[in-house]
Amino acid sequence: MKNIISTNQIETRNVFDELFNKVCNALSEDSDSDYIHTLSNMALLTKNDNAALNNSTFDVKRNQIVSMDQRGAFIPYCTKMVFLKYYTPSRENQIHFWGQKDRIAYIKAMENIIQPYLTIINKTF
């Protein structure tokens, strides 16, 4: 990365994308990206706010969410909680990326919240 920056070789999208992927993989728990388009990786934001976050690392997204919140932007409650790592137990917390333990804890929290409603639905059928 230092070599590319010092020689100013980020002239093409391919060079940037390759560097971006290396940095993201270094800051990630693993390089398996099957989870990216699943519920455990979704946050509710407006189209413009979501576009502003783009493909940044979790830490960068978290700081942007905090900044948006401080400016008074509407950030849904559970989306704030995701970026505050509210659902992840402290002993399993790593602040710099959204990993498998975070995804599992987030899904479990959703399951706990909707379970009473599923029970009611099952009783009515």
Image (cartoon, rainbow, N blue to C red):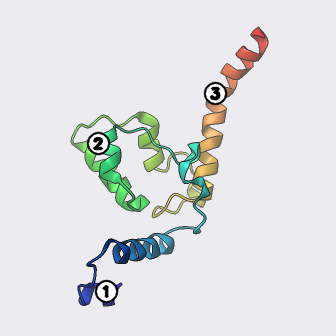
For image coordinates 23% across by 37% down, the residue present is 72
Q: Position of residue 35 (x, y in %)?
A: 59, 54
Q: Report which residue position mark 1 lands on.
A: 4
Vertical order, 41 against 93 (above or below)? above
Amino acid at circle 3: Ile
Q: Disc 2 and disc 1: Cα gap in Å?
A: 31 Å
* Residue 79 relative to residue 34: left or right: left
Q: Quadrant of residue 57?
A: bottom left
Amino acid at circle 1: Ile
Vertical order, 19 against 93 (above or below)? below
Q: Report which residue position mark 3 lands on.
A: 114
Q: Report which residue position mark 2 lands on.
A: 48
Q: Position of residue 13 (x, y in %)?
A: 33, 71
* Residue 29 relative to residue 64: left or right: right
The one of 118 and 34 positioned closer to us in this rendering: 34
Task: Give the mark, 2 or 3, whose residue is nearer the N terminus.
Answer: 2
Residues packed near mark 1 inside 10 Å, few (<14), some (14 to 19) or many (20 plus): few
For image coordinates 39% across by 58% down, the residue present is 55
Vertical order, 106 against 23 (above or below)? above
Element assignment for label 3: helix
Q: Quadrant of residue 71?
A: top left
Q: Disc 1 and disc 3: Cα gap in Å?
A: 49 Å
The one of 27 and 81 positioned closer to us in this rendering: 27
State yes or no: discs 1 and 3 in contact (Cβ < 8 Å). Answer: no
For the residues carrying marks 1 and 3, which lies nearer the camera in this image?
A: 1
Q: Position of residue 1 (x, y in %)?
A: 36, 84
* Residue 73 relative to residue 17: left or right: left
State yes or no: discs 2 and 3 in contact (Cβ < 8 Å). Answer: no
What is the number of the mark on residue 107? Answer: none
